[in-house]
Image (cartoon, rainbow, N blue to C red):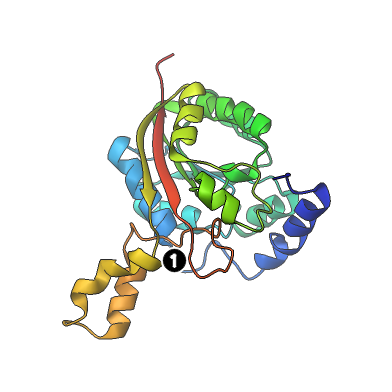
Amino acid sequence: MASPSPDRLGEYYDRQYGVALHESQDLEIPLRWDSRATSLIALGRLFSRFAPDDVFMDIGPGYGDALRLARHMLPEPRLACVEFNQDLVRFYRSVMPQISAHTSIKGALEEFGPGGVKYVYAAHSLEHFDIKDLKIELQNIRNLLHKNGAFIIEVPHVPEHAFNAARNHTPHLIFFSRKGLGKMLQGAGFRVRLCVEVIGKYGAGKNYAASMRQKAPEETEKALAQQLAAVNAGDWIGAPDNAKRGKILKCVVQKMGD
């Protein structure tokens, strides 16, 4: 299948991912629950200790949910992000001046130096890179990551049958299987500590709260299913009729010894 054209990509980022979607978002407003960010940050803490004044950096911060949660889940973190849309970088700097916002991973590397970031967080960001660019950026991330840090990743899980079923990939440029993602990360000098397939909160994922049916009202059951940290929204790859959400991959990797 051919990659999306520059025009299609431009339309997506201008109309569906621009500042217009973020104008009502303020990083200083009360915390908004986000199971994706919660689960990934919690997984990172299983493999790497985070100390006060360590840096948490989000690649592709979206609505800023992970940045908000990091302030509550990590001890006194220094917050940083890499956002390739310059309008959004200006937006983040205006609503949250204390954040270190960059338009490139290389720019973050210049500020923090080799090994200067303890947690690098990338939730549904890597699939937006061209394959050649991603290989370069993974090297930059490896250089940026602390020797005892954690690179925390979530991407759509796209085995061959799911790829063939999907009708519209824009703006995804890379499609990952568990095996392929693991090999790519290892090739970039990372040690894979965890890489698991997650079913999401659709389909079989609804069964997480099934045991509560006789003990709690339906609305409580739904709330629990939505708030469990391991439950996620999945992704639309492999769901041409939008009836099911596709699966995802969650990975935690660390840099191999220099």
Instruction: Locate the N terminus by quadrant.
Output: top right
Residue 257 at least partly seen: yes
Tell me the kind of residue under disc 1.
Answer: Leu
Work out which residue is located at the far bottom of the displayed protein and give it.
Answer: 217
Give the class, few, some or many, for how many residues have Cα within 10 Å of label 1's Cα (few <14, many ≥20): few
Residue matched to label 1: 31
Q: Quadrant of residue 104?
A: top right
The quarter of the rendered structure image containing the C terminus is top left
- Residue 172 lies, in percent from the top left, at 64, 49
Furthest-top residue in this view: 258
Q: Image point 59% across, 51% down: which residue?
A: 164
Name the outermost residue toward the right. 7
Q: Is residue 88 left or right of residue 234?
A: right
Residue that protrudes farthest toward the left in the picture = 215
Total labels: the figure holds 1
Can you give x and y, in whole percent of width and height, for residue 127 in the image?
59, 44
**Residue drawn at x 28%, y 77% as measured from the top left:** 221
Label 1, secondary structure: give it. loop
Identity of the residue drawn at 17% across and 82% down: 214
Residue 146 position, x and y percent, is 43, 27
User: Is residue 256 or residue 165 the one in the foreground?
Assistant: 165
Nearest to the observer: residue 257 or residue 70: 257
Is residue 98 visible in the rendered structure shown here? no
Q: Residue at x 42, y 39 (%)?
A: 53
The vertical placement of 244 against 171, above or below, is: below
Q: Left or right? Give the position of 199 relative to 15.
A: left
Q: Position of residue 85 (x, y in %)?
A: 72, 49
